Amino acid sequence: MAAASISRLQILSSSPSPIKIIKRSSAFLSKIPPIHNHYHHRSRKFHTTLCCSTSTPSRILENGSIVGDLLDYLNESWTQFHATAEAKRQLIDAGFDLLNENEEWELKPGGRYFFTRNMSCLVAFAIGEKYSVGNGFHVIAAHTDSPCLKLKPRSASSKSSYLMVNVQTYGGGLWHTWFDRDLSVAGRVIVRGSDGSFLHKLVKIKRPLLRIPTLAIHLDRTVNKDGFKPNLETHLIPLLATKSEEGSSETKEKNTESSKAVHHPLLMQVLSDELSCSIDDIVSIELNVCDTQPSCLGGGNNEFIFSGRLDNLASSYCALRALIDSCESSSDLSNDTAVRMIALFDNEEVGSGSVQGAGAPTMFQAMKRIAVCLARNNVNEGAIERAIRQSFLVSADMAHGVHPNFMEKHEEHHRPEMQKGLVIKHNANQRYATSGVTAFLFKEVGKIHNLPSQEFVVRNDMGCGSTIGPILASGTGIRTVDCGIPQLSMHSVREICAKEDVDIAYKYFKAFYQNFSSIDKKLEVD
């Protein structure tokens, strides 16, 4: 079957564990003003470019921009599972072959391949036709997870006359931004099939289902002076519904059963309706709480992207599209001696220490398997180690743009601005993996195509975040540069970046795949 004729559901179900994506609700989108649809030749589908203001008409995006596609990706990818599944769909649509980590691989120069792990981690690669064993890998790595609320294993609770859903915090979110938002749930479930097998399915409830209300100002008179400081265990519990009146014995019996349930029967009914299955057939759930407001363009000139999960799905999508588009034509890999790769990991927001995180040897194992497979069992001494030494990693994670109301939070000579290009991150204490050499090489890529870049270091009197860059650099010995798109409101339920920076990042990443080999040959450092 040709890739173009495979439906979204068939593609996502093609892995050893069948996947089901709940289709987008046209009824949901029809309620969002205003909408402009434009056709994209590759994916053969209509994009929905959303503008946040009804007073400013949406604009057709310039040719060559991926911003409309990014908005589609963000609106599809409520969770790390959906982000990975959507990346999988796009790779198959582009002609990449799906591999299974549990099976033997058959690879060839000029081939394009990928595999997923846990449906939240993905590695894709394209092999140059002139690749030989010992040549390097050119990798862009990002992460699919974002700070969010996750349902506890036993989520059912009740207070006063309300049904509540117990949640746990994931990552370092700005949790006050989750109050008074229209929330819902999305993630994955395990469903018992009619033949007794167990099916892995993705689910997304698009309608507002949950709400975390703030306390009225009349009951908290000092909040504006003292600050909003919610207790994350007792105050951050979403409302699901009101309890039924305890009248008949039948109602009392149902309420008794509900109080003993792991998850509220009402929530399970919503999930079963969405999945078209029986409640009894749902044997496991792993759900995130998600904001239902769509990602969209905003600002006076529509120059901004307003969205949740920009950190780090914006980087993930730029890397994905750069890889796909850099080897779109059959001639794109004809003279390449390297392997072009992306690695999208889960669990970065909590330290990467998982089987699907950057702390696992997933990327290194993939490199080794690729090299061994292409060597046809004739691996010379040090071939894998030589390949790593010739490789280069771009650790792509969103960057802190200077906040106009808090400029003092930035070191005065390192204040990245929106619409000024990619930010290269430096830290003397190795919270970022950038070195003088790797920064130079990466900036040379941009110079070829006149793509701007900026520099960032944190103030000496402030703590510094980190990325998967140092984890992968120390774990594999690969040369690494840390970079990112500047943004505001990082780790808020609703973040902001500039659409121009998204296109710059995409072009920069694509240029990296196309030009890095020639640049790297000009510099040798022992």
Image (tube, helix red, strand yellow):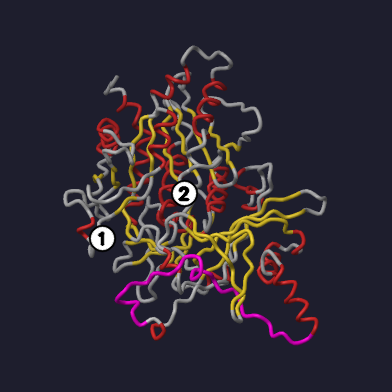
Of residue 50 and residue 376, the one placed in the foreground of this image is: 376
Q: CA distance from mark 1 to mark 2?
A: 25 Å
On screen, residue 470 versus residue 356, left or right, reads left
Determine the residue positioned at 49% across, 47% down: 347
Q: Give the magenta-colored segment's residue range.
A: 221-248
Residue most toward the right? 195
Q: Which of the marked residues, 1 or 2, is nearer the chain's N terminus?
A: 2
Quarter of the image that includes the C terminus = top left
Determine the residue positioned at 65% across, 27% down: 104
Q: Say whether residue 245 is magenta.
A: yes
* Callout 2 crowding tier (Cα within 10 Å): few <14, some 14–19, many ≥20: some
Quarter of the image that includes the N terminus = top right
Task: Please give the residue where the numbered disc 1 appears in the rendered image.
Answer: 403
Determine the residue positioned at 66% across, 54% down: 201
Q: Say whether residue 383 is magenta.
A: no
- Image quadrant in which you'd find residue 204: bottom right
Q: Residue 186: percent from the left, percent from the top?
A: 58, 61
* Callout 1 crowding tier (Cα within 10 Å): few <14, some 14–19, many ≥20: some
Of circles 1 and 2, the one toward us is 2
* Dot 1 amino acid type: His
Task: Please give the residue where the numbered disc 2 appears in the rendered image.
Answer: 350
How many numbered discs sit on the rendered protein?
2
Of residue 526 and residue 64, the one placed in the foreground of this image is: 526
Determine the residue positioned at 59% across, 68% down: 165
On screen, residue 5 versus residue 144, left or right, reads right
- Secondary structure, mark 1, is loop
* Dot 2 amino acid type: Val
| Marks 1,2: beta carbons within 8 A | no
Q: Residue 24: percent from the left, percent from the top?
A: 58, 63
- Secondary structure, mark 2, is helix
